[in-house]
Amino acid sequence: MSKAAFDPGTFCVEGVRELKPYEPGKPISELQRELGTSDIVKLASNENPFGPSPRALEAMRAELGNVALYPDGNAFALKQALASYHGIEANRITVGTGSDHILELIGRVFLGPGRSAVMSRYAFLVYSIVTRAAGAQLRVADAYEASHAEQPYGHDVEALLAEADDTTRVVFVANPNNPTGTWLKRVELADFLARVSPDTIVVVDEAYYDYVAPYERDYPDTRALLEQYSNLIVLRTFSKAYGLAGVRVGYALASTAVTDYLNRVRLAFNPNSLGQAAAVAALEDRAHIRHTVEVNRRELKRVGQTLRAMGLETIPSVCNFVTADVRRSGRDVFQEMLGKGVIVRPLDGYGLPTHLRLSIGLPEQNDRLIHVLRDVLGS
Ligand SMILES: *Cc1c(COP(=O)(O)O)cnc(C)c1O
């Protein structure tokens, strides 16, 4: 008699049962296999179309000879480079395999059954995954209405505060937010930090920092607020403007005490040695970041204007993507665009079934995107 098959749905931990995996941008190689063509443009994951600094590539090549050895588990060189770049002590920096990894560490340390985390509707979905995987309750605060004058679908500080109670251990704030591209101003963030319970961790995710800070005078210097708020964690990543999404490096700035706890659950050898070396070199190449964000701003403006000229509403964005309402099933439009070799991101998983998120690429890639979108929409 054979034994009954093990049923993971019965025996997995509570929070995991209802989870859906994060839907990443479709990889180019997958569409290549499906279409049998290599003429594909991916504007689906907010990657840097210029790639990383050549210095980062060089640093990885130099590091290849060492891959038989475990990486420096304390990431000494990377933490020193970040410490000097940010003017902060190295023992206030936690490095990980992408800021996704750090989000997971935050969930492990501060969330669990009987606790809750708060995020805004339409905020980055990884927050909900790490919260529920930790067995904590997720509370979703209403975002601003679609008709809001400045920040449609953006984070509403009052709503975030109203959702938090004495079970709330973490509030996630994406600034700016993916997939809306909206952001909180200095005064709004300061107001929020002053009013939220000091017993609640506030995670300010600044994945798109470099795209915003040079252009928006009211964008907060969150790093400076760390001196005042020991419950604050600032997240940054090398995946976006630094063009290193493939090697997975992100980090957190926080108090020494919070940093100590995050590092208790960090897997010792994250990030790997190639990522550590690449990040150190990439940080030094300020000209590459400047060029990246300048071209992005120009193209962001041009793509936005073109979409609006096509009669589509866009959410005002300060990032390297723009989210547009195509007024049809976004997933259908996404599918039809795939058939024409352009990968974008449908947002039904975010509760935005008629929106598409379009990453900003090189001018010619953006032209192709617009051309294909026009074709599919017949406009
Ligand atoms: C892309 C992104 C991240 C993180 O990416 P990693 O590659 O894991 O560093 C984090 N937060 C937001 C809002 C993002 O868009």
Image (cartoon, grey):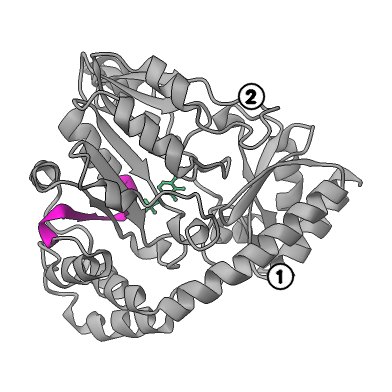
Find the residue positioned furthest to the right. 379
**Residue placed under numbered mark 1 in the picture:** 363
Which element carries disc 1, helix, strand or loop?
A: helix
Depth check: 199 or 304 in front? 199
Which residue is drawn at the image coordinates 26% and 86% (left, top)?
Answer: 62
Q: Amino acid at mark 1?
A: Pro
Q: Secondary structure at mark 2?
A: loop
Left or right: residue 324 compared with residue 85:
right
In this orientation, which residue lies closer to the viewer: 304 or 184?
184
Residue 97: in magenta span: yes
Question: Would you place residue 54 above or below residue 189 in this image?
Answer: below
Span shown in magenta: 90-100
Foreground of the two, 162 or 94: 162
Among the 4 quarters of the image, the one containing residue 39:
bottom right
Whether the residue under disc 2 has CB within 8 Å of ligand 1? no
Q: Residues within 10 Å of mark 1 (few under 14, many from 20)?
A: some
Q: Residue 372: where, in percent of width, then height? A: 80, 55
Percent of width and height locating residue 60: 30, 79
Counting other residues with Cα less than 10 Å from the Cα at mark 2, is it few (<14), some (14-19), or many (20 or more)? few
- At 32% from the left and 25% from the top, the residue drawn is 195
Quadrant (top left, top right, bottom left, bottom right) of the N terminus: top left
Q: Which residue position is annotated with label 2?
A: 145
Q: Earlier in the sequence, mark 2 or mark 1?
A: 2
Mark 2–mark 1 distance (CA, rounded to whole Å) = 32 Å
Mark identifier at residue 291: none
Residue 51 visible somewhere in the drawing: no
Residue flagged by tag 2: what amino acid is it? Glu
Instruction: Using residue 141 as the reference point, say whether residue 373 is left or right of it.
Output: right
Q: Position of residue 361 (x, y in %)?
A: 63, 64
What residue is drawn where x is 68% and y is 66%? 298
Q: Is residue 34 above or below residue 325?
A: below
Can residue 304 be seen at all in this image of the molecule? Answer: yes
